[in-house]
Image: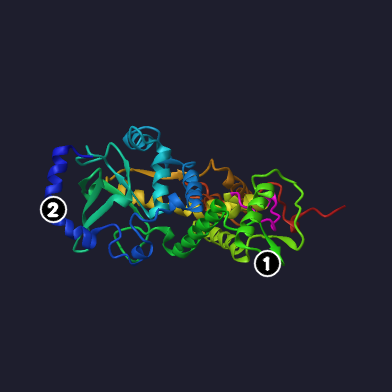
Amino acid sequence: MRIAAIAAGVRKALEGFSTALQEGDGLYANDPFAEAMNLPGQQDYYLTHAWVNIAIGILMRNIGRTEFAITKNGKTVNTGTVYALFNQPNRILSRYDLWKETGAWWFLEGEAFWYFGQGYTGGFPEEIHILNPRRMTMRVEEGVVTRWFYTTDGDVVPILPDEIVHFREWNPWNPWRGVTPLVSLKYELEQDSWANKSNTDLLKHNAIPQGILKTDQLIREEEADLIEARWERKYGKNAKNRKIAVIGKGTDFKPLTFSPDVLKLFDLKRWNLYTILAKYGIPPRVANIQDAKANLSGTDTESQHAAFWKYTLIPILKNFEMIAEAQFFRRFGLAERGTFDLSTIPELQKSEDEQSKRDIEEMAAGLKTINDVLSERGKPLKPWGDTWYRPGTVVPVNDAEKPM
C-alpha cells in the first residue's frame, strides 16, 4: 500500500514501538473475551461454522439490495463528486460491494474500516477501500487513537485517523475497537464444532457396527475371525443388497442403531442453530428453515421477512447512516447526506401500503392533517398542510333534512 522505500522506513521507525503494540495496542488488547475465544487467528467461524457463514451471507446480501442515495437539501442528486465517489468507490469496488463488505465485517468482527487510499493527501477523498479489521492495530495516547497500523505482506503501514472512517460496534472491554457479535456464543460454537467432528468421524470411520453376531457356543479367536470374515464377505456393506442370511445353530444377529447420546447431538445442533439466528436477528423462514411441527402460512412467512427488515436491517442501516454522516459528510463540511432508499424493498411494501391506508382514513376523519403525516415520514411540509379538508360528502346529522 506504500512504495518499498516508505515501507522500509516505516519498519525502522516502528522497531522501538513493537513492544507497545504487543502489550496494549493490538486488535484484542484488553479484551477479556480474546483468550476465551482463542483469538486471534485460531478460530475463524465464518470459515468453519456453516450457520455463521450462512447468517452473515443473508445479512450482507440483503444490505447489498438497498440503494445508498445521495441527497442535498432533501432532494436526490445523481451528479457531483460525492455521488461519483459512492457510485464507484474505487476501480474494483462497486457501490453495492461497498456496503456489502462493510456489513460483512460488521457482522463478523463488530467493526469495519474505510480507507481513503495510498494517494490521499488531505481534503475530499477520491477513493474508498475496505480494510481487514483483523490486520489493524493502533497507538493510543492519553485515551485517544493517534495512529493506526495496517499489516500486509510483511509490511506495517501507518495510517492517520483522518484517513479512515471507523464503523464500530459498542465494546465494553475496549472503547477504541468493535467487538464480534459471536463473543457470547463461544460455547454454542464450540459445541457445534465438536458435534460436527463427532458426526464426521462416525461416518468416516463407520464407528458403529451394523449389528452383532451372538452365539451361545464357545468359540476360539480364530473361529470368531473366520465367522466375521465370512459374514462380511457374504452380507457386508460391499455385498449386494437383499441377500438371505443363513446363520448357524445358536447364532443370532442383532442390528444396532445410533446411541441416544449421538442422537442428542442433533437436538443440540438445532438449539444452537436457533441461537445463532436469534443473535443475528434472522427469523427462521428468512433462512429457509421451517420446523417440521410448524405449519406456516404465506402470511406468516411474509411477516417474518418484513420483521427481518424492520427490526434487524433497518436499525443497522440507520446506524451506518449516522456513522457515515458524523465521520464523513460532516467531517468534510458537505451539504450532501447519504440515506438508504428502502422504497424498492418488496418485503416492506405491504406494511407501507397499510400505513398509507391508515393515514388516509385518519386524515378523512380529522385525526391527522397532511403535515402530520409528512412530519411522521420525515418529508418537507406543505404550506397549506395544516388545514383539515373535510370530505364534501359529509353532512352533519343535526342539519340533515327531515323526511317528508
Per the image, the residue denoted by label 1 is 218
Quick one: which residue is furthest to the right in this view?
404
- Residue plotted at (21% across, 49% down): 160
- Compare residues 233 and 293 and report the one nearer the observer: 233
Q: Amino acid at mark 2?
A: Glu
Q: Secondary structure at mark 1?
A: loop
Q: Position of residue 51 (x, y in %)?
A: 51, 52
- Say whether residue 389 is visible: no
Per the image, the residue denoted by label 2 is 15
Q: Position of residue 300 (x, y in %)?
A: 66, 53
Q: Quadrant of residue 152?
A: top left
**Is 60 placed left or right of 217 in the picture?**
left
Q: Position of residue 285 (x, y in %)?
A: 61, 51
- Say whether residue 156 is visible: yes
- In the image, the segment drawn in magenta is 288-299
Q: Secondary structure at mark 2?
A: helix
Residue 192 colored in magenta in the image: no
Looking at the image, tell me whether mark 2 or mark 1 is earlier in sequence order: 2
Q: Position of residue 347 (x, y in %)?
A: 58, 46
Residue 294 colored in magenta in the image: yes
Q: Main secondary structure of the magenta part?
A: loop
Q: Marks 2 and 1: CB-CB under 8 Å? A: no
Q: How is the image coloured?
A: rainbow
- Residue plotted at (64% across, 45% down): 238
Q: Amino acid at mark 1?
A: Leu
